[in-house]
Image: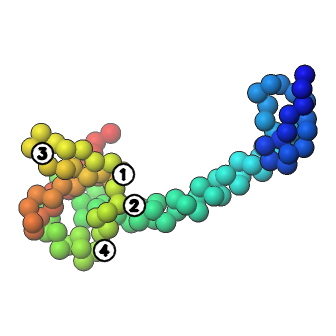
Amino acid sequence: MPSRKCKLCKSLFNGRTDKIFCSPSCKASYHQKLRKVTLSATEPIDTILHRNRSILLEIMGKSATQKKVPRILLDAKKFNWKYITAYHINSHQKIVHYVYDFSWMIFSDQEVLIRRLHS
């Protein structure tokens, strides 16, 4: 069985052919660093997405499933139009934007149709 180098500390070790770390502590350290780097890259975007969702939730309330609101209302609450979790083009060729469990569509220049998605 040939020796391999640990992916983290580069020390030589023996073991299964698919093993890439020399020890559980190297494996844990590697994945902890990976999570930290990922978090620092995604946290600013996640913050914006969560804020956008909170704005939509505040506007919709607890039980409304659909509401048409003036675009200026979302602008006043500092809704960030550029950040979405998904989108699609509906049968009327309108772009439907998603922020987690809400969708929104620009209905006209002055109005936005917001919908709560059902699970």
Determine which of the numbered discs, if any, sits on residue 85 in the image: 1
Which of discs 4 and 3 lies nearer the camera? The answer is 3
Q: Is residue 25 visible?
A: no
Q: Residues within 10 Å of mark 4 (few under 14, many from 20)?
A: few
Q: Are marks 4 and 3 in contact (CB under 8 Å)?
A: no
SS at mark 1 in the image? loop
Quadrant of the snapshot with the C terminus: top left
Q: Amino acid at mark 3?
A: Gln
Does residue 58 appear left or right of residue 40 in this picture? left
Q: Pick the residue in front: 103 or 97.
A: 97
Q: CA distance from mark 2 to mark 3?
A: 25 Å
SS at mark 3 in the image? loop
Sequence-wise first label, 1 or 3 = 1
- Report the residue marked by disc 3: 93
Q: CA distance from mark 1 to mark 3?
A: 19 Å
Q: Are marks 2 and 3 in contact (CB under 8 Å)?
A: no
Q: Are marks 1 and 3 in contact (CB under 8 Å)?
A: no
Residue found 64% across the figure and 53% down from its top: 35
Which of discs 2 and 3 lies nearer the camera? The answer is 3
Measured from the top left, where is residue 92 in percent x and y?
A: 9, 44
Measured from the top left, where is residue 48 in percent x and y?
A: 41, 65
Sequence-wise first label, 4 or 3 = 4
- Report the residue marked by disc 2: 49
Determine the residue located farthest toward the front in the rendered image: 2
Q: Is residue 3 above or below residue 78?
A: above
Q: CA distance from mark 1 to mark 2?
A: 8 Å
Q: Pick the residue in front: 46 or 4.
A: 4
Q: Residues within 10 Å of mark 1 (few under 14, many from 20)?
A: few
- Report the residue marked by disc 4: 78
Q: Are marks 1 and 4 in contact (CB under 8 Å)?
A: no
Q: Is residue 58 above or below residue 92?
A: below
